[in-house]
Image (cartoon, helix red, strand yellow):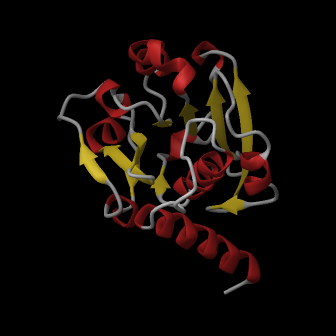
């Protein structure tokens, strides 16, 4: 295993461990917490390793995997630093920021933060039939056809995965990731 592969594996194991371990007693896990968003940034990076996109999601073999952020960016520089010079499935990772969902074009993982909560019902129709893994942090994110929801519970970060929504977008989520999450969603597709 190369040093880089070892670092990636260590990042993923640390993120998974954080799911199981409570935050330190003095830690406050709020929406503005730097630690919380560093952890979420690590998860966004690792989701790229545990999701398969259809071939037509990438116009060419050199097309990078794009992690997008719509609306306010709560990550600061942490997401950019985590994906800098990284590759997954022989593709570079890049981060793009979009003011609105209407600007989203070539994106593979899209983070939708709290600021977009009033527009959740409009986001899936705007993305159309594109194979974009949507990730959010509002309590009802997966109920609005979001695919992966971050949930803070008892100072722990939990994952909720709407498997039918992911299947409708022609995404395959690894069983390794599914085992770490609560699976939700009806068979309704977008």
Please identify the quarter of the rendering in which residue 104 is found: top right
Q: Nearer the viewer, residue 77 or 88?
A: 77
Q: Position of residue 119 (x, y in %)?
A: 47, 13
In the figure, is residue 118 to the left or right of 91?
left
- Left or right, residue 42 beside residue 182: right
Q: Residue furthest left?
A: 187
* Residue under the image location 56 percent in, 54 percent down: 43
Q: Which quadrant of the figure contains the C terminus?
A: top left
Relative to 63, 124 lies left or right? left
Of residue 187 and residue 142, the one placed in the foreground of this image is 142
Q: Where is residue 102 shown, x and y percent of the image? A: 60, 13
Q: Is residue 106 visible?
A: no
Residue drawn at the location 42% of the way across and 21% of the way down: 124
User: Considering only vertical position in the picture, is 30 above or below 157?
Assistant: above
Q: Quadrant of the N terminus?
A: bottom right
Count of labels shown? 0
Residue 117 percent coordinates (x, y): 47, 19
Q: Is residue 155 above or below residue 16?
A: above
Residue 151 to residue 20: above or below:
above
Relative vertical location of residue 60 with respect to residue 2 in this rendering, above or below: above
- Of residue 177 and residue 169, the one placed in the foreground of this image is 177
Does residue 139 show up?
yes
């Amino acid at each position: 295993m190369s040093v880089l592969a070892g670092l990636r594996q260590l990042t993923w194991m640390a993120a998974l461990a954080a799911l199981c371990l409570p935050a330190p007693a003095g830690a406050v896990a709020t929406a503005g917490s730097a630690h919380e968003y560093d952890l979420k940034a690590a998860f966004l990076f690792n989701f790229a390793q545990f999701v398969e996109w259809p071939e037509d999601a990438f116009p060419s073999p050199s097309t990078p995997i794009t992690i997008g952020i719509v609306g306010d960016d709560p990550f600061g520089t942490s997401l950019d630093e985590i994906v800098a010079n990284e590759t997954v499935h022989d593709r570079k990772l890049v981060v793009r920021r979009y003011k609105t969902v209407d600007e989203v074009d070539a994106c593979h993982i899209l983070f939708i933060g709290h600021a977009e909560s009033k527009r959740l019902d409009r986001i899936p129709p705007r993305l159309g039939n594109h194979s974009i893994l949507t990730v959010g942090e509002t309590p009802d994110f997966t109920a609005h056809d979001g695919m992966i929801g971050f949930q803070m519970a008892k100072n722990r970060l939990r994952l909720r995965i709407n498997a039918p929504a992911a299947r409708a977008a022609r995404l395959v989520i690894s069983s390794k990731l599914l085992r770490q999450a609560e699976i939700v969603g009806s068979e309704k597709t977008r």
